[in-house]
Amino acid sequence: MADVGAGFFSFTNVNGWSVTLAIVTVIVAWVASIYAKKGATALVARARGITPEFAALAARLVKYFVVLLGVGVALSFLGAPLQPLLAGAIIVGVVVVIALRGISDNFAAGIVLQTRRPLKVGDEIETDGIAGTVKELNGRSVVIRTRDGRTIHIPNSMLLQQPLINHSEAGARRSEVEVRAVVAPDALDDFTDAVSAALEAVDGIHTRERARILFSRISDEHVALTVQFWHHPTAGPIVLSRVVRTIGDLMRDRSITGTVQSGIPPAPLTPPPAV
């Protein structure tokens, strides 16, 4: 063991000055790492879209790098060759990268999400069939809350690999209901005008974009309508319920037979004989 140590450290060059320089170097590196951490924190804080967690992690990495650099210089004063130290650092770095590949992928993806900002806290997003409101963004995942109260942690890398749908970015979202009713052709205009007027009174429907009524099927007695309207991105289920009830009450008051539903069913292969 002594031979190994003698081979690594050149004790013939070790004296009081070299030991003193090594100790001073470590102390200076430690002090410098503290200031480097503060500087990195201030620098990262100027970047837009960087969360406090990312800033703290980056500052710690800078601090550790300065300390390790000082230790390497101190060992060189004691006669230790730098080539084995560099080789060991590279090997350790490769092992760490391989072991933490998933974490590093999510961390890098998190930086992209924080800087490009395709989503933010409060947005309603959807990816790979998972939909919910963003509650938190961190170095590993995006935390969302689904409409039925479940909390889901989506890995950051998944959001870059899968299509990301942001329902909130435009500030509004369109929904639609289908109306099937027994209405004579000469009464269609009166019926659609009544539906449009009723929708204007529904709480939650945006008034800057008027509701649209599209005809999908007309026969001698039956009509199928698609009613489209805009609302707040996260208020879809509530507004849909209000619209269905409002149109249903209108049809009941006018003694019109038919159905109103928010889920648009697939078109049948043959038209049904009745509504």
Image (cartoon, helix red, strand yellow):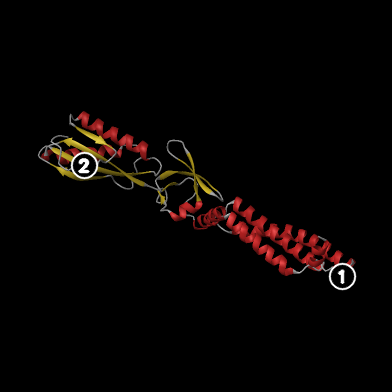
How far across and how far down the image is residue 4, in percent?
79, 63
Answer above or below: position of 175 versus 35. Answer: above
Q: Which mark is residue 12?
A: 1
Q: Nearer the viewer, residue 129 or 85?
A: 85
Residue type marked 1: Thr
Image point (17%, 39%), residue name: 190
- Left or right placement of residue 82 versus residue 218 in this view: right
Q: Are marks 1 and 2 in contact (CB under 8 Å)?
A: no
What separation in Å lies between label 1 and label 2 (alpha carbons)? Answer: 95 Å
Q: Nearer the viewer, residue 171 or 176?
A: 176
Please, which residue is most extreme toward the left here? 220
Q: Which mark is residue 225?
A: 2
Residue neighbourhood size for the residue with mark 1, other residues' Cα within 10 Å, grouped as few (<14), some (14–19), many (≥20): few
- Left or right placement of residue 105 versus residue 29 in this view: left
Image point (68%, 63%), residue name: 89
How far across and how far down the image is residue 237, in percent?
36, 37
Residue 190 seen in the current view: yes
Image point (60%, 50%), residue name: 53
- Which one is earlier in the sequence, the residue at label 1 or at label 2? 1
Q: Secondary structure at mark 2?
A: strand
Residue type marked 2: Leu
Residue neighbourhood size for the residue with mark 2, other residues' Cα within 10 Å, grouped as few (<14), some (14–19), many (≥20): some
Answer above or below: position of 120 versus 261. Answer: below
Residue 118 seen in the current view: no
- Left or right placement of residue 245 versus residue 189 in this view: right
